[in-house]
Amino acid sequence: MSGHRITASGLGKNYGKVQALIDVNLDVEPGEFLVLLGPSGSGKSTLVRALAGVEHLDTGLLQIAARTVDDTSVHVAPERRDLGMVFQDYALWPHMSVAQNVAFALRRRRIPRSEVRTRTAEALETVGLVEYAARYPSELSGGQQQRVALARAIVAKPGLLLFDEPLSNLDADLRERLRLEIATATRACGATAVYITHDQSEAFALADRIGVLDNGRLVQLDQPEMLYRHPATPFVARFTGRAGELPGTVLESAGGHATIKIGNSTQRTRTIGQLSPGQRINTIIRPDAAALTSTTEEGTLPGVVTDVAYRGRGYEHAITTEAGTLTGVHSPTRHERGSRIGLRLSVDGCHAHSSSDNCDDRDEMNVTTVRSESEARALVHER
């Protein structure tokens, strides 16, 4: 089975005066796993509901498998779009057994009973629930119910699978295991997948490409590594992992890099947008961009340890500098509170932008943060 191509041009959706989607353009390859990432209210749920046919777009053209499913004159019903959907709340029929819930998608397509039984058993085998076929949803754990929902989505072998934050109701350990199962099952069936989440680590682990939405706009669409190394906007940089943001002044800027002054320290950074000498800026610093060192080392930013926590792989420190505080600064050794320390900042992990840019944090501090480029790369290749 091959997945469907998705082509979207100029998508817009309004709820009264609220613009939920603004001029969204997408081109998703057949079989690609796309993750839509953003905080609450960014428009990701509206976009997935539009793909599903639950929402009718106000503007734009949406095509699935080269067929127009939504524009100003056409709206194809969800059941005619050849897609499966996995919901956050499972959406299982409580009066039906596990097997009946999974088979329901096939019976609606008037498939012979013998084939329904075979394909239902195959889907339950894929998610490891064959022995639970006769049970009812109320007799299952949350993780098992979500596996049933996944089996129901893939049993009809649709060309498109949509995931509406399916792991958000589960505990951390179960989320990790089901995340891998979702990636494996989806790629095994060959379907195109669109998955929405506000959790960056989940996005980096699953995605071939990540689309970041901000206030209804798709502000960047790229491979996970490129998204982390080259954020298109300050919002993208903040949302995909930061230790802190320090103010400073541009000394010189050229070729996507700048020399800046932070406090009494001179640093080299990447730039977001055009910067000019003398301009006031803020520098977003990735957690892995700051290394602890001696205060006497040239080019370091001096600071004081204000907090320290053991994280298994080492220690994470909060460091207060004359310009501000950085958190989550890793070191294999512990530095006690009150210790004077130096921070050596790497060029590639620092992103300077105009201080006049929007600094609205919204929900990005309430999500799991990807702490380093190496972690991002590991999550990308985990699948």
Image (cartoon, rainbow, N blue to C red):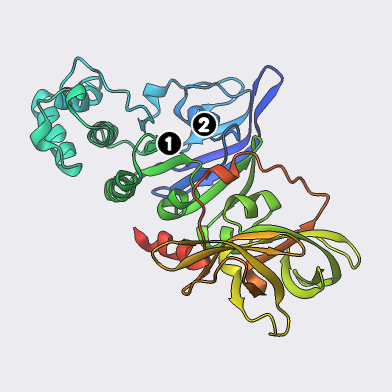
**Image side of residue 95 versus residue 196, left or right:** left
From the viewer's side, name the closer residue of 128 and 375: 375
Instruction: Classify residue 311 by image quadrant.
Output: bottom left
Compared to 231, does 269 lie above or below? below
From the viewer's side, name the closer residue of 238 and 366: 366
Q: Are marks 2 and 1 in contact (CB under 8 Å)?
A: yes
Which residue ends up furthest to the right in the rendered image? 278
Kindly identify which residue carries mark 2.
45
Q: Count all numbered tags in the image, as a single digit.
A: 2
Q: Quadrant of the C terminus?
A: bottom left
Q: Position of residue 50 (x, y in %)?
A: 52, 28
Kindly identify which residue carries mark 1.
165
Mark 2 nearby-residue class (10 Å; few <14, some 14–19, many ≥20):
many
Mark positioned earlier in the residue sequence (2 or 1): 2
Q: What amino acid does circle 2 point to?
A: Ser
Residue, x 19% and y 26% (percent of image)?
A: 103
Q: What amino acid does circle 1 point to?
A: Glu
